[in-house]
Image (tube, grey):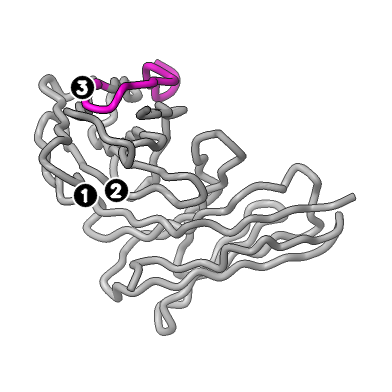
Amino acid sequence: RKEVEQDPGPFNVPEGATVAFNCTYSNSASQSFFWYRQDCRKEPKLLMSVYSSGNEDGRFTAQLNRASQYISLLIRDSKLSDSATYLCVVGYNFNKFYFGSGTKLNVKP
Amino acid sequence: GAGVSQSPRYKVAKRGQDVALRCDPISGHVSLFWYQQALGQGPEFLTYFQNEAQLDKSGLPSDRFFAERPEGSVSTLKIQRTQQEDSAVYLCASSLAGDYGYTFGSGTRLTVV
């Protein structure tokens, strides 16, 4: 079983839509959680850290559910420029990080 | 420097050839990671350094893979006797501390022919 699992998608949504991705992790000792964004043929870039209390950054909201071992990313008012692959990252001991395979998002005009 | 720098950006190697991939992390970043990303997959952990100490190399797929960071700054990932299954993008990332998330370099795309 993989450490981090994500629905690969693709999620095809119209501009302005709200879309949510989930990611589940297997290690209950996991301590840190992140969402990264990766554009085609580019390196992953940190989108946001995920905190137990949930956190918001503009149109993006991330939440952590430790009991069920999943994290989520909500994108409101989708823009064409949001089209990318979103990678869920889970870490423990602060030196062991596992990536999901990514969820592909296509925002259509 | 301002970001994590990796070189070369692209490398084509003949099967059996040795290659060396370089990573220049953000100045002052203690943690350095190497990842391997196959097409359509998420990055897979290879190895981790804290300063010059290689604390975890559990992700290295075989003894043909070797990484070093002798002075706690620049790191080199070496692959000996390359094979076709080694073809992938090799990403380096550095972090001030693990809980801040980390910054990736642009990667080296290795193609073994």
Give me the residue at 25% from left, 37% from top. B31
Q: Residue furthest bottom?
A: A67
Please state which amino acid type lies under the numbered disc 2: Phe
Residue B96 on the magenta span: no
Q: Which element type, helix, strand or loop, lies under badge 2? A: strand
| Circle nearer the viewer, 3 or 2 | 3
User: Over which residues does the magenta segment extend?
Assistant: B1-20
Do residues under tags 1 and 3 come within 8 Å of each other at their CB atoms? no
Above or below residue B36? Residue A77 is below
Q: Which element type, helix, strand or loop, lies under badge 1? A: loop
Q: Residue B30, image x and y in percent?
A: 23, 33
Give me the residue at 26% from left, 71% from top. A29
Nearer the N terminus, badge 2 or badge 1?
2
Q: Residue B62, image x and y in percent?
A: 15, 44
Marks 2 & 1 on one chain: yes
Q: Which residue is mark 3?
A: B18
Q: Residue A48, image x and y in percent?
A: 53, 51
Q: Residue B51, image x and y in percent?
A: 16, 31
Question: Between B35 and A89, which is closer to the camera in this rendering?
Answer: B35
Residue B108 placement: quadrant: top left
Give me the residue at 35% from left, 68% from top. A2
Q: Which residue is mark 2?
A: B45
Q: Quadrant of the N terminus of chain B?
A: top left
| Circle nearer the viewer, 1 or 3 | 3
Label 2 CA crowd tier, 10 Å (few <14, some 14–19, many 20+): many
Spatial CA span between label 1 and label 3? 19 Å
Residue B89 showing in the rendered view? yes
Marking on residue B59? 1
Do residues under tags 2 and 1 come within 8 Å of each other at their CB atoms? yes
